[in-house]
Image (cartoon, rainbow, N blue to C red):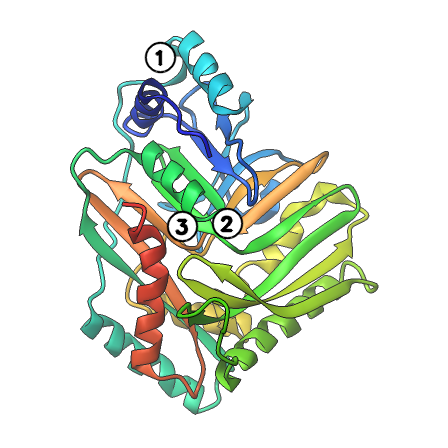
């Protein structure tokens, strides 16, 4: 991706310091970024994913919807593609018409996790798996770090674009959510017209030799199989004649995953919110059975995931939709940064192996700092 001038970087960085509603994103294997800019500071808050039915704009939705972390939709008053056009658009809009000097509203603090915190949480998670109450649980954590001096969110976005061409890269800011930067490899829903696509992305190995990858072990194959079975059941209710491709190995930053593609048809695109409500959270970020493991995570993980492992991206029922699971992401606040990562836990999981998996995943965003 081409590097924009310092003037444009400063313009975009200033938006993250005020009450703007905007998203800058780049889809996989493309070069041109897209800016979705709302012209006023009133953030659109939705009560649930089903309220996305018939709407279009840029979505950022949490793992669990709460009063402090609601589903947010950025209204696309301006949709601008390419650095040159973005700079022209921002240069012609008076600042007081798009943003105010009011600082963003943040709510309760999410604390970081050290290895001891993670090990204690792992002990809580492994017991119900060994007792066969659950098939799978996803345990995540966050790492709190000081923000580098003179940090530029826009420059970090550009580094992520250049480092991770296979991923959807996003820089999103609203007064409600704060500032998030992410590089997600996982589609939750994409498509246009009647043709739609989702993926099962589960199973993780660090990259040591990209040419001669080791064989996937039983634990990773089982993890992928759980997600596939879940998606088959969901998709079958919308299209009984869907197609499936995979699993196969894909790279995502410093790790590789097992991936299976699902292609299906939708006759009514005005109800995408209903489908998203069924899909989210998938076993790739939650567990099985869905509701029981979701409740267990909220009670036992030990922190609020906020918008990590939620949904982020563009939705348009009348045209193209590209929505991703918000993985490999970080939240910026004041002089600190929160980096998020997680992994699937089965009864056979090893705590040290799982911890190292989160380290590799966090490094995906750590490397762009």
x and y, in percent, of residue 69 in the image: 39, 46
Distance between mark 1 and mark 2 Cα atoms: 32 Å
Query: In the depicted view, which residue is nearer to us: 105 or 308?
Result: 308
Residue 137 in view here: yes
Residue in view at x 37 percent, y 41 percent: 159
x and y, in percent, of residue 368 in the image: 32, 46
Distance between mark 1 and mark 3 Cα atoms: 28 Å
Identify the disc placed on residue 95. 1
Front of the two marks 2 and 3: 2
Callout 1: few (<14), some (14-19), or many (20+) C-alpha neighbours within 10 Å?
some
Distance between mark 2 and mark 3 Cα atoms: 18 Å
Identify the disc placed on residue 307. 3
Quarter in which the C terminus is drawn: top left
Identify the disc placed on residue 251. none
Q: Mark 2 points at which residue?
A: 167
Secondary structure type for disc 1: helix
**Figure quadrant of residue 332:** top left
């Amino acid at each position: 991706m081409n590097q924009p001038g310092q003037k444009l970087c400063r313009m975009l960085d200033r938006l993250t310091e005020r009450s703007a509603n905007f998203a800058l994103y780049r889809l996989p294997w493309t070069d041109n970024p897209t800016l979705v800019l709302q012209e006023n500071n009133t953030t659109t808050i939705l009560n649930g994913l089903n309220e996305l039915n018939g709407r279009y704009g840029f979505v950022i939705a949490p793992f669990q919807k709460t009063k402090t972390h609601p589903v947010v939709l950025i209204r696309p008053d301006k949709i601008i593609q390419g650095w040159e056009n973005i700079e022209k658009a921002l240069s012609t809009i008076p600042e007081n018409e798009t943003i105010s000097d009011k600082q963003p509203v943040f709510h309760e603090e999410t604390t970081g996790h050290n290895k001891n915190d993670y090990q204690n949480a792992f002990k809580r998670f492994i017991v119900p798996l060994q007792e066969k109450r659950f098939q799978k649980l996803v345990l995540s954590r966050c790492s709190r770090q000081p923000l580098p001096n003179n940090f530029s969110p826009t420059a970090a976005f550009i580094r992520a674009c250049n480092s991770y061409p296979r991923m959807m890269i996003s820089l999103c800011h609203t007064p409600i959510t704060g500032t998030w930067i992410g590089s997600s490899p996982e589609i939750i829903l994409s498509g246009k017209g009647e043709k739609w696509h989702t993926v099962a992305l589960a199973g993780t190995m660090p990259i040591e030799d990209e040419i001669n990858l080791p064989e996937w072990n039983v634990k990773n194959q089982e993890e992928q199989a759980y997600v596939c079975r879940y998606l088959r059941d969901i998709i079958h209710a919308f299209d009984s004649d869907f197609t499936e491709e995979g699993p196969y190995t894909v790279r995502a930053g410093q790790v590789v995953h097992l991936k299976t593609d699902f292609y299906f048809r939708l006759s009514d695109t005005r109800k995408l919110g209903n489908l998203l409500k069924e899909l989210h959270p998938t076993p790739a970020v939650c567990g099985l059975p869905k509701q029981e493991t979701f409740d267990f995570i909220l009670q036992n993980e030990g922190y609020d995931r906020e918008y990590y492992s939620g949904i982020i991206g563009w939705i348009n029922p009348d045209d193209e939709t590209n929505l991703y699971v918000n993985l490999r992401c970080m939240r910026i606040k004041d002089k600190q940064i929160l980096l998020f990562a997680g992994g699937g836990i089965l009864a056979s999981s090893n705590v040290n192996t799982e911890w190292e998996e989160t380290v590799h995943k966090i490094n995906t965003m750590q490397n762009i700092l």
